[in-house]
């Protein structure tokens, strides 16, 4: 696999991966990257989870609030 990298500098590519993750739309339009992440999360919550687990819309809003709390909380800190 490393043979496919033209410069063979893996750490450079690894640090890019840490910055942007694996979402291909980062390279499509960097100015809308965060919006696309939010859209993806909303689709997962509203469409995928609600259909798979028959979650009602008001419960999806509660899940979004819980997810927000988790995302803005300091890691490994008790509340």
Image (tube, rainbow, N blue to C red):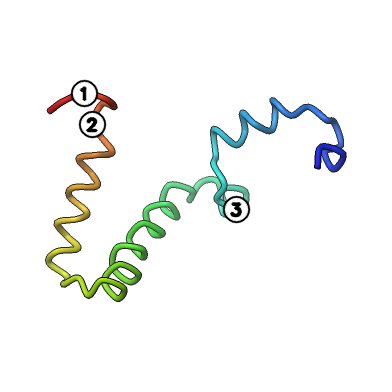
Q: Position of residue 48 (x, y in %)?
A: 35, 69
- Residue 34 shown left or right of residue 65 in the figure: right
How packed mark 3 is, by other alpha carbons closer than 10 Å (few <14, some 14-19, many 20 or more), is few
Question: Foreground: 59 or 52?
Answer: 52
Q: Position of residue 64 (x, y in %)?
A: 22, 54
Quadrant occupied by the N terminus: top right
Question: Foreground: 66 or 42?
Answer: 66
Residue contact between numbered discs 2 and 1, judged by CB atoms under 8 Å: yes
| Residue depicted at x 14% and y 56% | 62
- Residue 18 shown left or right of residue 73 in the figure: right
The local secondary structure at tag 2 comes to loop
Numbered badge on residue 24: 3
Pointer 1 or 3: first along the chain: 3
- Residue 47 shown left or right of residue 63 in the figure: right
Number of the front mark, 2 or 1: 1
Number of the front mark, 3 or 2: 2
Residue 10 quadrant: top right
Q: Count numbered badges in the picture.
A: 3
| Residue depicted at x 85% and y 31% | 7
Residue bearing mark 2:
73
| Residue depicted at x 81% and y 37% | 2
Numbered badge on residue 77: 1
């Amino acid at each position: 696999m490393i043979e496919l990298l033209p410069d063979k500098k893996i750490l450079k590519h690894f640090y890019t991966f840490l910055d942007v993750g694996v979402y291909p739309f980062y390279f499509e339009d960097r100015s809308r990257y965060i919006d696309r992440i939010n859209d993806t999360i909303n689709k997962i919550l509203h469409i995928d989870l609600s259909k798979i687990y028959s979650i009602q819309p008001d419960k999806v809003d509660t899940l979004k609030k819980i997810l927000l709390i988790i995302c803005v909380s300091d890691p490994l800190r008790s509340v």
